[in-house]
Amino acid sequence: MSNIIDIIVPDIGDYKNVVIIEVAVKPGDEIKQEATLITLETDKAAMDIPSTHAGIVKSVYVNLNGKVSQGDKIISLEIAEPADKPKSQASEPVATPAPAAVVAPAPTTTTSPVISSPPAAPDKPIISSADIYAGPATRRVARELGVDLTKVTGTGRKNRIVSSDVFQFVKNIMTGQTSIPGVNTGGGLSVAPDLDIDFTKFGAIESKPLLRIKKLTAANLHRNWVKIPHVTQFEETDVTELEIFRQENQAEAQKRNLKLTPLVFIIKAVVSALKAYPQFNASLSKNGEDLILKKYINVGVAVDTPNGLVVPVVKQADTKSLFDLAEELGALSQKAREGKLTGQDMQGGCFTISSLGGIGGTMFTPIINAPELAILGISKTQIKPVWDENTNGFVPRKMLPLSLSYDHRVIDGAEAARFIVHLAKQLQDIRKLLL
Ligand code: CAO
């Protein structure tokens, strides 16, 4: 017995009208459950929408470069079993790639899609210039100006690209209004003096495509670096007592299958500093006239993955114990490394921590993760001689380097210094941190 069902776009967080960058199925295809139907691209990452069921694709309702929101139909699928049967077997949304939702006759499920690992050939152009709707005159203008038409939005009928779109595209780049991976948007400044250099003149080379997440991150980092006036305030804090406490509690953490790293304590200290200085737990309004103060504290943590940098968010960090934070951090970073973070896992951050403490280095200047106003960089703890007034001599202490980059449009240097001193004191005196 067979049945035809529609598969719809599941809960994709707050995103609406998201661009489809890949349609992986066509009518007649026989697909397995969890097979990718379409790939969506937001400003943060790409996400695959997998199928809830196995079956034969009858119709495809979406198009490449079209836009979809939650609830839109993707395909109709002929399945081999009664449609209401799999409903009771719906996959858990967390551990496995979450499937797309199904509409009638089976009831809707609303699981989230998964941030995908980039496909095997990630730098293959998503659409080629030949697939673009543009006339010969427009193509000539684009050629003369060196514009890649796959990057241009068409305003003509059926999204056809016309010459004025190409000129507008160039204007946006020159004025820094357009941000495109791999394209310089820094107010007309070149990334390198001449990108047409033939490096083979100097020796052997290998050209390797940038992964998709890396290209998206590059565009965001570039925009944030160019648009936000950054200042970085440095500090070192004495974590000797904290390290003793951490080692004392490591056995208990292990019993719970957790790892109590310095980062867990740093999240706690950041929560305390954000409470004391709420202007850091805020964003600028769109028109730049107001400060939007947030009454919740969600802390993003930069995670290094084989596919690039991602920033999952520990939600309501102010309500969580050290062990809760250790558990959540472990789960989120594992999910990140497996490429299974959902859009929701990466939304809603108020402040980000980027820890390179497990790797090394003395200090660095992290780039603010807009629309947040500040970011904390952590480097490796080192034993250093510190002057002790009681003994009138140097004593070896464990010193943790902190780097706070902040948006100087909103935060004054004095406020940043107060924030980092507060943070340092929290980490120095473990009793304060546990209060
Ligand atoms: N000083 C000294 N040692 C530190 C430390 C510090 N500041 N921070 C962590 N460590 C130690 C940990 O205690 C752990 O030691 P053991 O293996 O002996 O237990 C080791 O370093 C590795 O820690 P970790 O990386 O597994 O865990 P974490 O909680 O410190 O960090 C995470 C988790 C996900 C943030 C981290 O793994 C990661 O991805 N860091 C990179 C983030 C990044 O790329 N930032 C740059 C963004 S800008 O390009």
Image (tube, rainbow, N blue to C red):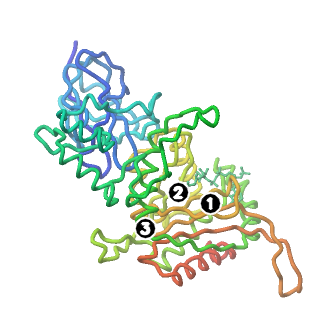
Among the two numbered marks 1 and 3 on one chain, the one whose residue lies closer to the N terminus: 3
**Residue at figure coordinates x 34%, y 76% from the top left:** 291
Residue 430 to residue 64: above or below: below
Q: Residue at x 26, y 38 (%)?
A: 9
> What residue do we see at 24% from left, 35% from top?
8
- State which tag comes first along the sequence, 3 or 2: 3
Q: Mark 1 = which residue? A: 263
Residue plotted at (52% across, 72% down) = 231
**Residue 432: which quarter of the image?**
bottom right
Mark 2 vs 1: CB contact within 8 A: yes
Q: Would you say 89 lies left or right of 277 here?
A: left
The 10 Å Cα crowd at callout 2, few under 14, some 14 to 19, many 20 or more, is: many
Marking on residue 301:
2
Ligand 1 picture quarter: bottom right
Q: Report helix, strand or loop for mark 3.
A: loop
* Pick the front one: 46 or 258: 46
Q: Looking at the picture, how far across and down is residue 261, in whole percent?
A: 66, 57
Identify the amino acid type marked 2.
Val
Secondary element under disc 2, as helix, strand or loop, is strand
